[in-house]
């Protein structure tokens, strides 16, 4: 297999106060492509607390002028960014595929497109930053305003790096905040490319990007005294650490965290469509590296064996390979560390007494797929909901299947998790499907549908999957504005 990663290592700088800069101490971080072990495709600044301080101060300095720009004008700039993002889809898609390992056709290009859609969507919401008047009696004029917080720290993971950046940057800027964006050390290149496009339309310091690790950049950013709001997407444990940091200064926090989402399949579901949908919902095309991956599959016992056979037949046809190859359905796991973690779970599943491997397993140690961090779609059957593989977020292409015979018991098992991000119902009876959707503890339930979020729908988790909502008007207002009431005595 020839891996078509960019021939030269790119060395982008990061964005602070409108300037493209190196880390203060000159340190750098290598970015490897997961498509080919050890192949470095980029080198970015490795920042520390001094760089974070510089970026936050630049954002704070830019805030008064930016909040004074009329909301519709801020929206117009976001729309222009969206136009430029549309024009850059192919470049962004290649960068995304190279650094994340996500296949260009099924994941990276759609992510680049949706990033443009998000900037366009939020760009159109300038007129929605409105308040209300309150009836407090004849002698009083009372009204509310929606005001920005100030400097927003936006901390994002590697799995869909620019879509998640857009979820935060676009609404935060529209609402009049300035932003310091911290991409993951595993996938900073597309985020820097996104910033370059944004910067062409924004005043200096309104958007800043600081690259580096969680410890060296994320922690000082989340605890910086001038940061007025934190919007974080990532692991639940990291989210808890950020909440603790924020508690010291009572800084508001929006959290989009992990998941172990259930898929509930009833015997009357259209088996063929459901099998395609289960594959989509499990996000196999993103190697299962999705917070909304439907990674626990509960199948009614009457159709359990036949459905798993059908599912395995479809999974066997997925082409795992070079993320830059248009023919690949699935690419590579993002990093060696993540690959080893996923392999450890697969090893455990394969040796779990009572469980059965339906398809997949540990990746081959030589041959085409051993060149990078490739893992075949893997399904374990006859699992129990209290086993580790059914409880912990694997963040890999590993689906566990559990049979059920009693509906109430199936719903109880689906809800028996400390996560509550997404859930999927596969059912032929619409009333039963809706009753089930209402009974599931999740921020987002899909019925006979396994695809991703639609721009504009409120998105976020129940329980330990998150706090607050994104991707929507409500998300923008909730996450990036604070309400002020103004009372004016107008008595004669
Ligand atoms: P992660 O929590 O390790 O890292 C996320 C970001 O936080 C990175 O930029 C990282 O550098 C930074 N970070 C790490 N430690 C930090 C600290 N102590 N203080 C401040 N920042 C810190 O997550 P990840 O491995 O990059 O991403 C995978 C996780 O993200 C999964 O758990 C997944 O479910 C979750 N996720 C959630 C959503 C959602 O919308 N709910 C979307 C995508 C990913």
Image (tube, helix red, strand yellow):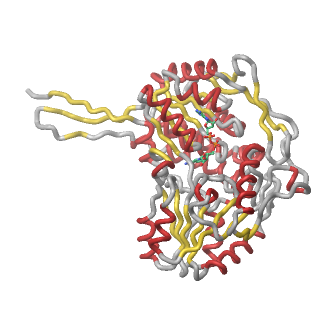
Q: Residue at x 49, y 40 (%)?
A: 171
Instruction: Work out whether residue 335 can be spotted.
Output: yes
Whole-percent x, y for residue 65 in the image = 47, 23
The C terminus, quarter of image: top left
Q: Measuring 51% from the left and 19% from the top, which residue is drawn there?
A: 61
Relative placement, left or right, of 22 versus 413 is right
Report the number of numbered marks: 0
Of residues 378 and 40, the one drawn nearer to the viewer in this rendering:
378
Q: Percent from the top left, x then y, of residue 356?
A: 71, 70
Q: Position of residue 118 (x, y in %)?
A: 55, 47
Q: Of all residues shown, which one is farthest toward the front?
A: 353
Q: Nearer the viewer, residue 160 or 6?
A: 160
Residue 68 appears anywhere in the view: no
- What residue is drawn where x is 82% and y is 38%? 41
Q: Is residue 103 left or right of residue 430?
A: right
Q: Is residue 270 above or below residue 232?
A: below
- The single residue placed furthest to the left in the displayed view is 492
Which quadrant: the N terminus? bottom right
Image-quadrant location for residue 139: top left
Above or below residue 162? Residue 344 is: below
**Above or below for 72 versus 329:** above
- What residue sits 69% from the left and 73% below the top? 311
Q: Tell whether 144 sits left or right of 342.
A: left
Determine whether, in the image, residue 480 is placed left or right of residue 360: left
Question: Where does the image place residue 406, in percent across and percent down from the top left?
Answer: 48, 76
Front one among 335 and 137: 335
Quarter containing ligand 1? top right
């Amino acid at each position: 297999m020839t891996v078509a990663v960019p021939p030269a290592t790119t060395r982008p700088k990061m964005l602070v106060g409108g300037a493209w800069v190196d880390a203060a101490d000159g340190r750098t971080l290598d970015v490897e492509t997961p498509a080919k072990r050890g192949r470095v495709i980029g080198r970015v600044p490795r920042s520390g607390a001094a760089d974070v301080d510089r970026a936050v101060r630049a954002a704070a300095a830019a805030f008064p002028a930016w909040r004074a720009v009329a909301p519709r004008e801020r929206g117009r700039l976001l729309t222009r960014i969206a136009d430029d993002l549309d024009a850059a889809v192919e470049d962004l898609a290649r960068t995304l595929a190279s650094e994340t390992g996500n296949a260009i056709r099924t994941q990276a290009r759609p992510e680049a497109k949706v990033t443009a859609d998000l900037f366009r969507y939020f760009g159109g919401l300038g007129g929605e930053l409105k308040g209300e008047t309150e009836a407090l009696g004849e002698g009083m004029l009372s009204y509310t305003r929606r005001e920005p917080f100030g400097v927003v720290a936006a901390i994002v993971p590697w799995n869909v790096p620019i879509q998640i950046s857009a979820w935060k940057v676009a609404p935060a800027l529209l609402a009049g905040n300035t932003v310091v964006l911290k991409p993951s050390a595993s996938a900073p290149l597309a985020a820097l490319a996104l910033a370059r496009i944004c910067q062409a339309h924004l005043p200096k310091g309104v958007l800043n990007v600081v690259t580096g690790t969680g410890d060296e950049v994320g922690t000082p950013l989340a605890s910086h005294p001038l940061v007025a709001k934190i919007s974080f997407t990532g692991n639940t444990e990291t989210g808890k650490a950020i909440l603790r940091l924020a508690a010291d200064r009572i800084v508001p926090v929006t959290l989009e965290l992990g998941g172990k989402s259930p898929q509930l399949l009833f015997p009357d579901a259209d088996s063929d469509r459901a099998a395609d949908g289960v594959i989509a919902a499990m996000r196999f095309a993103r190697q299962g590296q999705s917070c909304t991956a439907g990674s626990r599959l509960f199948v009614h016992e009457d159709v359990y064996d036949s459905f798993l056979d059908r599912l395995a037949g479809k999974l066997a046809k997925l082409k795992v390979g070079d993320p830059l190859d248009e023919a690949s359905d699935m690419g590579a796991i993002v990093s060696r560390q993540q690959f080893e973690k996923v392999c450890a779970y697969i090893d455990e599943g394969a040796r779990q007494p009572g469980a059965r491997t339906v398809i997949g397993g540990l990746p081959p140690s030589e041959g085409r797929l051993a060149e990078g961090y490739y893992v075949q779609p893997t399904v374990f059957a006859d699992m129990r909901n209290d086993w580790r593989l059914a409880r912990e977020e694997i963040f890999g292409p590993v689906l566990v299947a559990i049979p059920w015979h009693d509906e109430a018991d199936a719903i109880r098992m689906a809800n028996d998790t400390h996560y509550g991000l997404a859930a999927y119902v596969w059912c032929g009876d619409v009333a039963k499907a809706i009753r089930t959707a209402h009974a599931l503890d999740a921020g987002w339930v899909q019925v006979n549908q396994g695809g991703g979020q639609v721009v504009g729908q409120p998105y976020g988790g129940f329980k330990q999957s998150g706090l607050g909502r994104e991707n929507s008007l409500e998300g923008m207002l909730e996450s990036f504005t604070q309400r002020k009431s103004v009372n004016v005595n107008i008595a004669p």
